[in-house]
Amino acid sequence: MNTMWQGCLADTDYFEVRSSGGHDYGIWVTTPPGYDPATTQAPAVYVLDGNWAVGQTAPLIVTQKDPLQQIQPYIQVSVGYAGEDAQHWDRLRNRDLVPPGEPIAKELIDAVEAGFRTGARTREESDAYLAELRDTHADAFLGFLTTELHPRIERDYGTAASGHGLFGYSYGGLFSLYTWLTGSTLFESIGAGSPGVVSEDSQIFARLAELGDSLPAAKLHLTINDRELLGELAVYQTLTKHAAAVLHQLTARGALVTSAILHETHVTGLQASFLSYLRTCRAR
């Protein structure tokens, strides 16, 4: 990392990797202050949407030195897109973070169309965004994280053998729920911020029904934002309603799940949600 970026994201390395599926990813690895794997090995926390999230979340690595509430040591691995794909991260994430067969809710289509009408996206960008939602592969992306990327992080950064975490927000939060429901054994704690469960026929509800009372052992922390619920956008109102439904089903079954309502919008909630996950699941 060059001098300018090193000043912005201290103790951060960057590299690019091509998955076995032929997709190019940008990886930012932020180590704890003074990290020395020869003396103390730290687990990894994988943060999704790296192109957007790394600048807001990686600096929080200093919480490991907070004298008032220390967070357990962790290495942050932010996963985003590289090369030409980096400028299209907000639609390519649909391919990687959404479970296979996830329905496209009318509220989401309406939100995309509203974005076109207000000039937030061009017609071409809007169509490309929705096209990615018609062929989604969260299963392949989970395989990349666990069987391709993690072994490299483990080798190059001397991570601990256990205690790893995963955090995702919005569609990243949907992916977090999906990962938790698969029973992946890599992650001991998972944060799902404002998870994008927009359709009432979501694969999340289908998987919950399939699991019954046989729930995963990993800790799950779910957050939503009050201004999503109280705002005027139907897609966010629906998201919070379904997130609450997921939470109620899990607590009724005795799942190891915690939750928080944050005073944020959907856009501003990312950092607050990540910090809530750290404080809840990774405090000393």
Image (cartoon, rainbow, N blue to C red):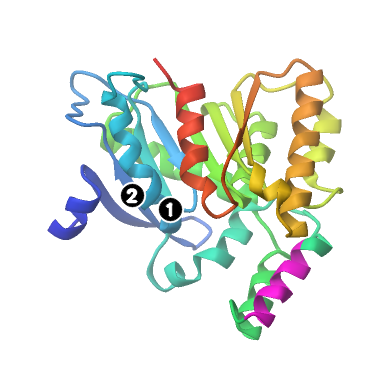
Mark 1 closeness class: few <14, some 14–19, many ≥20 residues within 10 Å: many
State the image coordinates of residue 193 (x, y, percent, origin top left).
59, 41
Q: Nearer the viewer, residue 272 or 59?
A: 272
Mark 2 closeness class: few <14, some 14–19, many ≥20 residues within 10 Å: many
State the image coordinates of residue 89 (x, y, percent, origin top left).
50, 65
- Residue 70 drawn in magenta: no
Identify the residue at image location x=61%, y=50%.
170
For the C terminus, the image quarter is: top left
Q: In terms of secondary structure, where does tag 2 sit?
A: strand
The tag earlier along the polypeptide, 1 or 2, is 2
State the image coordinates of residue 138 (x, y, percent, origin top left).
64, 50
Identify the residue at image location x=76%, y=25%.
250
State the image coordinates of residue 216 (x, y, percent, origin top left).
68, 22
Image position of 21 (left or right of 118): left
Residue 50's label in the rendered image is: 1
Q: Is residue 155 above or below residue 36?
A: below
Identify the residue at image location x=32%, y=18%.
68
Going by the numbered disc 2, the residue's amino acid type is Trp
Q: In terms of secondary structure, where does tag 1 sit?
A: helix
Identify the residue at image location x=24%, y=19%.
40
Q: Is residue 242 above or below residue 283?
A: below
Image position of 93 (left or right of 50): right
Q: Gap in Å between the C-alphas at discs 1 and 2?
A: 8 Å
User: Can you see residue 17?
Assistant: yes
Name the residue that disc number 2 marks: 28
Image position of 60 (left or right of 95): left
Q: The magenta stretch spans which residues?
A: 108-118
Place residue 86 in its image quadrant. bottom left
For the N terminus, the image quarter is: bottom left
Determine whether label 1 and label 2 are within 8 Å by CB.
Answer: yes
Q: Is residue 2 above or below residue 122?
A: above
